[in-house]
Amino acid sequence: AQSVSQHNHHVILSEAASLELGCNYSYGGTVNLFWYVQYPGQHLQLLLKYFSGDPLVKGIKGFEAEFIKSKFSFNLRKPSVQWSDTAEYFCAVNARVRGKLIFGQGTELSVKP
Amino acid sequence: GAVVSQHPSRVICKSGTSVKIECRSLDFQATTMFWYRQFPKQSLMLMATSNEGSKATYEQGVEKDKFLINHASLTLSTLTVTSAHPEDSSFYICSANPGTGGAQDYGYTFGSGTRLTVV
């Protein structure tokens, strides 16, 4: 069965600091990988996704993620965070096109102005 | 873009009663929908996969008789929490993937969620 692990439960940064959120998945086959963001009181929004091709994926709002197959990882990065990036971030994986999506535990990001 | 509409957004019910949550795909047909449960400050736990015209597929540990899922049409799936108890209080979210293939596929869209409080 698929599983997703996010290393950081709560990350606190100052504005302009760099961000990296870890995500590892457990599945032996081909997977599709996603990062979602959930702002307070809002529903999930897709930040970026990877399904094939260039392992470095660029998403919205300056976020990017790198898929490292040998490490089963899909870490999210942003060079310089803003206060408005304060939110909950979820890594997710599916093993089949339009199949069920399994989420990691989530990482709460707090950015201090 | 593809939209999933979920109702109600908030419901309070008494212990022992049943509550129905609706999830509609507004501008696409969804043969499959997914139901999640989210506890405060925690992740989305997949409860079940709803399949149009057939039985839902439940994840391990999810009580089929408590969480009844019906997917009667290509645009509507419902989750009924039967004989609700306070421990069923949670945030329930539905999702669907309207992808039609190609580079723009694999996009899931989520409902805005239903906050259920059982008193």
Image (spheres, rainbow, N blue to C red):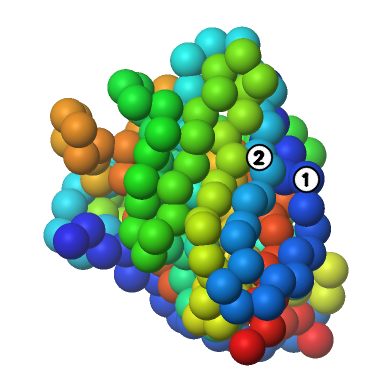
Residue B51 image position (x, y, % from top left): 40, 37
Kindly identify which residue carries mark 2: A23
Which quarter of the rendered picture does the C terminus of chain B lie within? bottom right
Which of A35 and B56 lies nearest the eye of the viewer? A35
Dot 2 amino acid type: Cys
Q: Quadrant of residue A56?
A: top left
User: As displayed, is residue B59 above or below residue A21?
Assistant: above
Q: In which quarter of the image is residue B11?
A: bottom right
Q: How far apart are marks 1 and 2 (CA)?
A: 7 Å
Which quarter of the rendered picture does the N terminus of chain B lie within? bottom left
Chain name for mark 1: A
Secondary structure of the residue carrying numbered label 1: loop
Residue A86 image position (x, y, % from top left): 59, 76
Dot 1 amino acid type: His
Q: Badge 2: few (under 14), some or many (20 or more) residues near its Cα, within 10 Å?
A: many
Kindly identify which residue carries mark 1: A7
Which of B36 and B88 lies nearest the eye of the viewer? B36
